[in-house]
Amino acid sequence: MKAPKSLIEATRMFSDANTAHAYLCDLRWPDGVIPCPNCKWTAHYFLANQRRWKCKVCKKQFSVKVGTIFEDSPLGLDKWLISVWLITNTRNGISSCELARSLEVTQKTAWFMLHRIRMAMQNGPLHRFEDGVEVYETYIGGRARNMHKMKRARKITGTGDKDEAIVKGTLERGGPVKVQVIPSPDTKTSDKMDARPTRTRSLRSGTSEVSISTP
């Protein structure tokens, strides 16, 4: 199931509880194998009215929210997924007041949602890339010749790009951009940092000022 490209498409898609549930299931378990979070067995049956599973081994019930930022929240997936779309696709960011008006919830609830989503975005991706992904790398940092002498002596400890941050950007054509800071300019480190779930069939890599190379 592909991610929505616009707000109206996201609203139409996630306003249906079954579609929102199926979308999150597809993100969490793309291979269709759903393990029980308690005993890890995959023998269970689905309770359609509750949109929950009941494990045949430990007899405990679980939902698609278990183990996610949506767990223990009374809010439905319709509000959660629309808020995720808004936060990840708004160029200049979104405030809790604006999110509260958009979702018709209180400002306190919107702040809680913003906090959880932003924390999740720091730890890893919320989005699985589809076809046509481009990867670029660059060095970010001020040039030594433009710095004051005292600042240059404090910040510059080596030659070349040693004191600049290496940033890697992953772009899905027509979709969002994921940016990561890479600690070392080698292929092994770059691949380890790039921990996104993906189903890409075409991949193109490029560089800006620097190439990822094997030491």
Image (cartoon, rainbow, N blue to C red):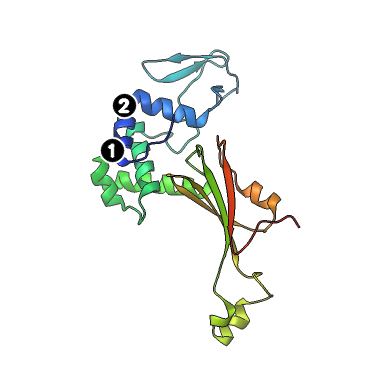
Q: Label 1: which residue?
A: 8
Residue 172 appears at what percent x and percent y?
48, 44
Q: Position of residue 117 (x, y in %)?
A: 42, 45
Viewer can see residue 124: no
Identify the residue at image location x=30%, y=30%: 15
Secondary structure under the numbered disc 1 in the rendered image: helix
**Residue 141 visible in the current orientation:** yes
Characterize the local packing of mark 1: few (<14), some (14-19) or many (20 or more) Cα atoms within 10 angstroms: few
Q: Position of residue 198 (x, y in %)?
A: 55, 37
Q: Which residue lies furthest to the bottom in this view?
A: 149
**Which of the two marks, 2 or 1, is nearer to us in this view?**
1
Q: Residue at x 33, y 36 (%)?
A: 10
| Residue 27 percent location from the top left of the image | 49, 32
- Amino acid type indicated by mark 2: Asp
Residue bearing the label numbered 2: 16
- Secondary structure of the residue carrying tag 2 is loop
- Residue placed furthest toward the right: 215
Above/below status of 76 relative to 138: above
The N terminus lies in quadrant: top left
The amino acid type of the residue labelled 1 equals Ile
Camera-side residue: 215 or 21? Answer: 215
State whether residue 171 is above or below residue 166. above
